[in-house]
Amino acid sequence: MVVISLPIGFFLVNELTKLSEDEQMVERVFTKQLESILFSVNQYSENVISYWVNNLDLPIECNSDAMQEVASNVLENNPSIRQIGFIETGKNESLAIYGQNPGTLYTRIIEDKEKVDALLEFLESDYQKIEILSLGKETGLYFIMKNQGSQVLCFIVVNTEDFIQQGLGAEIQQVSQELFQIVVFGPIDNSIVYNTGVDSPDISEVQHTPLWYFPGYELGIKLLSGTIDGLVSERSKKGRSMLWGLVAVVFIGAVFVIWNIRKEIRLAELKSDFVSNVSHEIRTPLALISMYAETLKLKRLSKPEKYERYIGTIHAESVKLSAIVNNILNFSKLEKGKKFFGLVPEPVNELIETILHSYKPHFEENQVEVSYTPLERNILIKADREGVSEAINNLLDNAIKYGKESGKKVSVKCITQKKNVFIEVEDNGIGISAKDKNHIFDKFYRVTKGDLANKVKGSGLGLNIVKQIMKSHGGAVSVKSKPGEGSCFRLKFVIAKNKGNGKNSDS
Ligand code: ADP
């Protein structure tokens, strides 16, 4: 288990760390993406303002008709612009003012001398900077341009909320793409100036950035499908459950592989036990046959009556030998699926009586008290005589082998229940433990504990053969047993229907 758990644990810790790093990265990527959307809105407002500047920065007299036409055009096409004015910087004189009545804004601009000087310096270095002055609902944008040999300060007064709603609105709608909610907050109490959504968003879920040209105003964005935190945690939840699923699969797979390896090792051990058990079982009758045959061959018999006994032993041992070999051959055929059973309707009582009759000498030899209970009404079962006989013989062999040392009892019963006939072989022998009961039908399995286990010889094939025969009969074998109290093996057969009337016959 340590061999499996260690690498899986290492893998898990490694993957979980990677996952949380991924989460942080995804969160950063999402945040950056939203930032760049807000950046594009700011960029757009800068483009619009630069366009106005380019339209006004002309080498024509500021109070000429031509300039008036230009300014009127700009005012007409951009309703958020309230006023356009020109001031000669050295003299601080107003050259021309277009649009609404002159407010106080331009005097405020001139008063801030430092900023004007800075703009002049920038212009000297060929950079035309745009300066901002916020005045309540209006924003003043001003810059210096060279005009008719002098430096002229041009200012544009914009109604901020009109610009946001009319000028920026369309762009904001376009970039929101129904995926995001974009909001513009005003300078007072986060009042909403523009909103692409229907509800005002929860302020804590919104990502903010200031509007470059409109001090105090802020752009806010949020995902419509939830929050970034929510999305990231959803992703990581999925990632984590997939990871746990993977770990579970790897773990189950590893346990399965180990279980299989152990099973194969166990089978290899059983096979090797089987070879030694069978060799042992074969060696004894072979030794006896060869010894008695040699004695007969050399005609060393002192008394002629011994001749019968020797011949009898040779015969009995060769029968045992051929039974062992037959068992192995039958097992091999069954394993390869080469043994075929011709299932025909057989009367149960007669079938079992015949089998018991042929087994009689073994009962006598082992001094077994046998009882037999046939069916009251004989029934036909689907059976192959040879197969059933082999299965019952194996059960009877075991009943004797694992029976009591003295006072062996075997009871054979035929029972009918619903659509099946059962044949029970019960003994009063050593019984089988609950743990062994789960394995005795496995090939090569033998119980190796207990006094009798070592004394009694066997190959571990008998019950597996019974199981395979019963399977071929469409039936099954089961066992009830308690250690020290005996065992009862039960064979289940299918009742055969008479071809003529579909009913079973009475004998
Ligand atoms: P074998 O008898 O050659 O060992 P089997 O496949 O016939 O092989 O039986 C498997 C094991 O089941 C036996 O080793 C024995 O421990 C147990 N067993 C089978 N029949 C009985 C029985 N009637 N009573 C007690 N144990 C039994």
Image (spheres, rainbow, N blue to C red):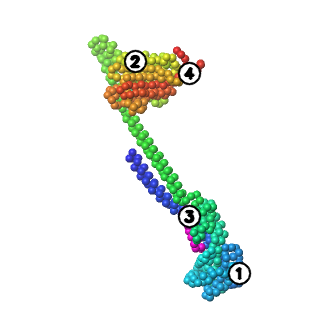
Confirm or deny contact between disc 4 and disc 1 (CB under 8 A).
no
Residue type for callout 4: Lys
Find the residue positioned furthest to the bottom: 91
**Dot 2: few (<14), some (14–19), or many (≥20) neighbours within 10 Å?**
some
Q: Which residues are magenta?
A: 204-218
For marks 3 and 2, the one nearer the N-term is 3
Residue 68 numbered mark, or none: 1
Cα–Cα gap, marks 4 and 1: 116 Å
Across and down, in percent, residue 369 comes to: 38, 17
For marks 4 and 1, the one nearer the N-term is 1
| Image quarter of residue 323 | top left
Mark 4 — residue?
A: 497
Cα–Cα gap, marks 2 and 1: 132 Å
> Could you say which is closer to the camera, residue 110 or residue 399?
110
Residue type for callout 3: Ile
Image depth: mark 4 or mark 3 in front:
3
**Dot 4: few (<14), some (14–19), or many (≥20) neighbours within 10 Å?**
some
> Helix, strand or loop at disc 2?
strand
| Image quarter of residue 481 | top left
